[in-house]
Image (tube, rainbow, N blue to C red):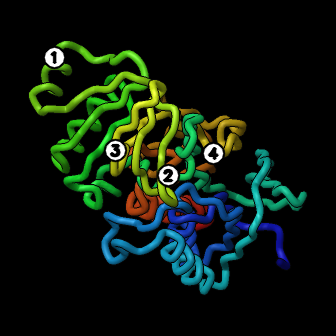
């Protein structure tokens, strides 16, 4: 790479980051994408709810996107991990794991979120395959199947209301004392949704496809899929270290233009929205790229 100075650095080169890069590349902006090749859906066999790409493996979509983006000659790509960034007089500097330092006028963080998955044997192997998070992304494939919801309280009740439309075989797995109001319990009962409070000790599966949930009592119950609602955290702590504020849900706070609370920093993808899907990531990545280009244009025209 001949240059280390860019107009825009995009940290994160999955769907949102690549979408932002394409918008900028088409405006002849000098862009660097930094990505270490570990998207959160790398284990998911097929992507859904994204028109023209329904049922395509996520890695295939990402590879095609990267190929198309890098045809724009003003875009560079480095396979590495961004480990630090600092505000400078004319913008920002970004340092990668290898020690290289790049400078830029604007930064877009498309760094995603990290799932804080429970320490249950078999969970990690099933995550994104049959242990799933989104009815819109995965629900249709498990319609009419024996389905669990591993969550409690409001999160479990919300998921149950959505998944109830997809199957009549639904059970909530609270892994502890159920935390529902009397009205919620009555609603769940009216839809024949059972609740199991026993803790889960293991997931029995075949290459990530769930077969049985094993409880701490030793009881085994057959399930085809389980929705899991658990906490997430920012995949990168760099935006917060630069002063970006978070929402009460732990996402990076943005305005309607994907701009953070720090001037010159934009974000897109899972790190800043509760709608966690490829389609959403591509959409707000495109918006972030366009808004950064608009800001650069305003500064120099």
**Quadrant placement of the N terminus:** bottom right
Q: Which residue is mark 3?
A: 222
Using the numbered discs, state the Cα–Cα distance from disc 3 to disc 4 in whole angstroms.
33 Å
Mark 2 lies on a secondary structure that is helix
| 4 or 2: tag closer to the N-terminus | 2
| Residue where numbered disc 1 is placed | 183
Disc with the residue nearer the chain's start (4 vs 1): 1
Whole-angstrom CA distance, mark 4 to mark 2, is: 20 Å
- Mark 2 → mark 3, Cα distance in angstroms: 15 Å
Assess whether mark 3 and mark 1 are in contact (beta carbons under 8 angstroms). no
Let me know if residue 288 appears in the view: no
**Mark identifier at residue 64:** none
Is disc 1 surrounded by few (<14), some (14 to 19) or many (20+) residues within 10 Å? few
Q: Can you name the residue that lies furthest to the right here?
A: 99
On the image, numbered disc 4 is attached to which residue? 235
**How many residues crowd around disc 3 within 10 Å: few (fewer than 14), some, or many (20 or more)?**
some
Find numbered disc 4 in the image and state the secondary structure of the residue it sits on: loop
Residue drawn at point x = 54 percent, y = 46 percent:
122
Mark whose residue sits in front, 4 or 2:
2
Which circle's residue, 1 or 3, is located before the other in the chain? 1
Query: Which quadrant would the C terminus be assigned to in this image?
Result: bottom right
Q: Position of residue 207 (x, y in %)?
A: 51, 60
Left or right of 297? Residue 86 is right
Residues at marks 4 and 2 touching, judged by CB atoms closer than 8 Å: no
Q: Are marks 3 and 4 in contact (CB under 8 Å)?
A: no
Q: Which mark is residue 126?
A: 2
């Amino acid at each position: 790479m001949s240059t280390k100075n860019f107009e825009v650095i995009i940290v994160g080169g999955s769907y949102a980051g690549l979408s932002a890069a394409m918008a900028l590349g088409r405006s002849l902006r000098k862009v660097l994408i930094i990505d270490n090749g570990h998207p959160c859906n790398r284990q998911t066999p097929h992507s859904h709810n994204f028109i023209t790409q329904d049922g395509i493996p996520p890695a295939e979509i990402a590879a095609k996107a990267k190929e198309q983006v890098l045809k724009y000659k003003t875009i560079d790509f480095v396979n590495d991990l961004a480990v630090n960034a600092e505000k400078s007089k004319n913008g920002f500097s970004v340092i990668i794991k290898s020690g290289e330092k790049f400078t830029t006028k604007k930064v877009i963080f498309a760094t995603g979120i990290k799932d804080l998955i429970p320490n249950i044997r078999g969970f990690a192997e099933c995550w994104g395959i049959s242990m799933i998070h989104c009815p819109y992304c995965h629900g249709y494939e498990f319609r009419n199947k024996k389905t669990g919801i591993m969550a409690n309280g409001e999160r479990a009740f919300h998921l149950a209301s959505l998944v109830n439309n997809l199957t009549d075989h639904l059970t909530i797995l609270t892994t502890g004392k159920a935390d529902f109001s009397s009205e919620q319990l009555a609603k769940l009962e009216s839809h024949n949704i059972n609740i199991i409070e026993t803790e889960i000790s293991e997931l029995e599966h075949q290459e990530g496809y769930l077969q049985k949930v094993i409880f701490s009592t030793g009881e085994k119950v057959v399930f085809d899929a389980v929705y899991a609602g658990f906490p997430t955290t920012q995949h990168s702590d760099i935006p917060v270290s630069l002063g970006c504020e978070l929402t009460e849900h732990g996402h990076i706070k943005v305005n309607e233009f994907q701009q953070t609370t720090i001037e010159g920093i934009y974000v897109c993808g899972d790190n800043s929205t509760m709608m966690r899907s490829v389609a959403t990531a591509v959409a707000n990545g495109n918006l972030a790229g366009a808004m950064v280009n608009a800001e650069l244009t305003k500064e120099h025209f």
